[in-house]
């Protein structure tokens, strides 16, 4: 799909994966996949989302199997991560103007919408115009920086029914973020807060007990802040064998803001990277089940 020019004039693209055979008039769930930074949409082949696409039902009842996968492409932009991920292909979750209304004006200053969010909006709408999408079942997942962007996006889009990111740093404050903010479900009191417009969205946050850059304790902090804002969060922490556990591995980092700690903890850093760069194949079905169990109530407005 594309090219489509975003608000900054950048050509944007997306891949649309449909089941091989879809009966005429049948509407399917739409799963948005956001790729990790420094890589692209091809990373979906390192998940088993497309393997399950033809046989797994996200609609429930007698609707039958199958769902559509939409994989938008990020852009070359600055990231507030350490080198080598300080710039490259990816997503901007640090500019947090994601109002569903689009541009926001405060006084005489106009703040345009985050162009990555607008790009995802555009390609969802384009997919929906085919008439094949069940707008009660629009779901979001992502990996790493794509997980952070996917969570931020879902928390601000009332048409998203549920979100299940994997191994994503806190989109509101991680690592060298110069403007950490707490999500709130109301107008912010000051610059230390940021409003989310879809606090009812169910969240299944999957991450490793030992993850790169202290993502585990960083995501635990995120879960507490989201719950305080009224968001229903299910934390899924997995160990090196893929089994669910109750806590992070302290040797891989304890800082709630995250941190690489390469010199101080090289074993935790490298083990965390090893876990981070592998999609949790054994948890994809659980993520899809989470989606299936959370249709949008009521249905989203037509595109």
Image: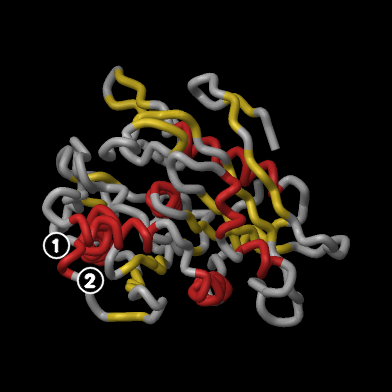
- Relative to 179, does residue 19 appear above or below in the rendering? below
Q: Number of callouts in the render?
A: 2
Label 2 crowding class (10 Å Cα cut-off): few <14, some 14-19, many 20+? many
- Residue under label 1: 254
Please name the residue shown 21% across and 71% down the image: 249
The answer to whether residue 229 is left or right of residue 136 is: left
Secondary structure found at label 2:
loop
Q: Tell me which corner region of the image, top left, top right, bottom left or bottom right, holds residue 50.
A: bottom right
Residue that appears at 60% across and 47% down? 42
The answer to whether 294 is drawn above or below residue 279 in the figure is below
Residue 4 point in image, percent of width and height: 64, 28
Q: Residue at x 50, y 48 (%)?
A: 35
**Residue 280 location (% of width, % of height):** 47, 68
Q: Which of these two is toward me, 106 or 38?
A: 38
Q: Is residue 219 left or right of residue 55?
A: left
Q: If the image is split into quadrants, where does the N terminus sit?
A: top right
């Amino acid at each position: 799909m594309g090219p489509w020019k975003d608000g900054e004039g950048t050509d944007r693209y997306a891949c649309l994966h449909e089941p091989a055979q879809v009966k005429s008039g049948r509407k399917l769930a739409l799963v948005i996949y956001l790729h990790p930074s420094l890589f692209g949409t091809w990373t979906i082949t390192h998940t088993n989302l497309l393997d399950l696409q033809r046989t797994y039902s996200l609609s429930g009842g007698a609707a039958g199997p199958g769902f559509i996968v939409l994989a938008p492409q990020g852009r070359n932009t600055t990231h507030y991560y350490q080198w080598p991920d300080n710039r490259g292909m990816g997503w901007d979750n640090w500019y947090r103007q994601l109002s569903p209304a689009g541009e926001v004006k405060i006084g005489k200053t106009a703040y345009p919408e985050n162009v990555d969010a607008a790009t995802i909006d555009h390609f969802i709408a384009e997919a929906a115009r085919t008439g094949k999408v069940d707008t009660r079942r629009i779901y979001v997942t992502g990996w790493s920086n794509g997980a952070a962007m996917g969570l931020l996006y879902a928390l601000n889009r009332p048409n998203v029914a549920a979100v299940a990111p994997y191994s994503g740093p806190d989109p509101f404050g991680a690592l060298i973020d110069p403007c950490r903010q707490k999500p709130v479900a109301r107008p912010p009191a000051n610059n230390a807060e940021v409003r989310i417009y879809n606090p009812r969205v169910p969240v299944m946050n999957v991450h490793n007990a030992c993850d790169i850059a202290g993502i585990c304790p960083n995501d635990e902090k995120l879960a507490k802040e989201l719950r305080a804002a009224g968001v229903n969060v299910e934390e899924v922490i997995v160990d090196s064998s893929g089994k669910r556990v109750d806590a992070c591995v302290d040797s891989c980092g304890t800082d709630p803001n995250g941190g690489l700690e390469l010199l101080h903890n090289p074993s935790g850093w490298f083990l965390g990277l090893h876990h981070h760069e592998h999609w949790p194949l054994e948890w994809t079905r659980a993520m899809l089940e989470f989606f299936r169990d959370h249709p949008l109530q009521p249905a989203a407005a037509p595109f």
